[in-house]
């Protein structure tokens, strides 16, 4: 069965290529060979090259394995960390809570209300 590659828009293609380049540079900075990183990540060397090219057909699990080998697994937590647009959309749909008029409790009622006498109301201003 032939492998299908997801269709991506140009900005996403550039982002993946940039990610792959950063992973390659991180590997080289650590002076790790492609063969050793591939072996530790549990992938073929050709797959590692595809990761470093930013190939969208490579699974996210493979990218995560390479990040782990390079000691960058914490960076995966930064993906979509603060969903600003999602929060704004959520806030727009939050129902507004209508507060019912507060009833005074038995301890707050004036003593004259218990005696059957009307409670004087506050004078109205003109």
Image: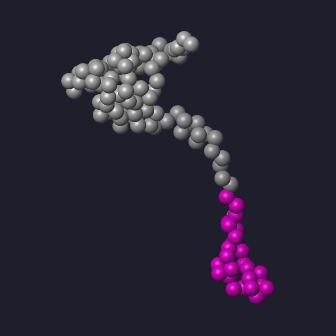
Is residue 1 visible from the viewing direction of this image? yes
The residue range painted magenta reads 99-125
Residue 7 visible to the viewer: no
Colouring: one colour
- The x and y percentages for residue 26 are 27, 25
In the image, is residue 61 above or below residue 124?
above
Q: Residue visible at 41% across and 26% down?
A: 62
Q: Residue at x 41, y 37 (%)?
A: 77
Relative to residue 38, is residue 126 depicted above or below?
Answer: below
The percent position of residue 50, horizontal first and vertical second, equals: 39, 16
Q: Nearer the viewer, residue 87 or 35?
A: 35
Q: Quadrant of residue 39?
A: top left
Residue shown at the point (35%, 37%) measured from the top left: 74
Locate residue 124, reporting x and y percent: 70, 68
Q: Is 123 a magenta residue?
A: yes
Q: Nearer the viewer, residue 119 or 93?
A: 93
62 vs 25, left or right, is right
Q: Residue at x 63, y 44 (%)?
A: 94
Q: Is residue 14 left or right of residue 98?
A: left
Quadrant of the image containing the N terminus: top right
Q: Quadrant of the C terminus?
A: bottom right
Question: Magenta stretch: residue 95 in it?
Answer: no
In the depicted view, which residue is nearer to us: 81 or 120? 81
Q: Along the line of sight, which residue is nearer the eye, 46 or 14?
A: 46
In the rendered view, tell whether residue 16 sits above or below residue 112: above
Q: Which image quadrant for residue 34? A: top left
């Amino acid at each position: 069965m032939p492998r299908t590659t997801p269709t991506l828009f140009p900005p996403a293609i550039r982002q993946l290529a940039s990610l792959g380049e950063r992973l390659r540079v991180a590997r080289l900075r650590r002076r790790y060979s492609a063969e050793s990183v591939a072996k530790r990540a549990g992938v073929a060397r050709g797959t590692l090259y595809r990761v470093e090219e930013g190939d969208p057909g490579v699974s996210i699990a493979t990218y995560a394995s390479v990040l782990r080998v390079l000691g960058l697994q914490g960076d995966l937590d930064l993906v979509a960390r603060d969903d600003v647009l999602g929060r704004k959309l959520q806030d727009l749909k939050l129902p507004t809570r209508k507060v019912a008029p507060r009833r005074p409790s038995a301890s707050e009622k004036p003593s004259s209300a218990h005696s059957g006498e009307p409670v004087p109301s506050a004078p109205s201003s003109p």
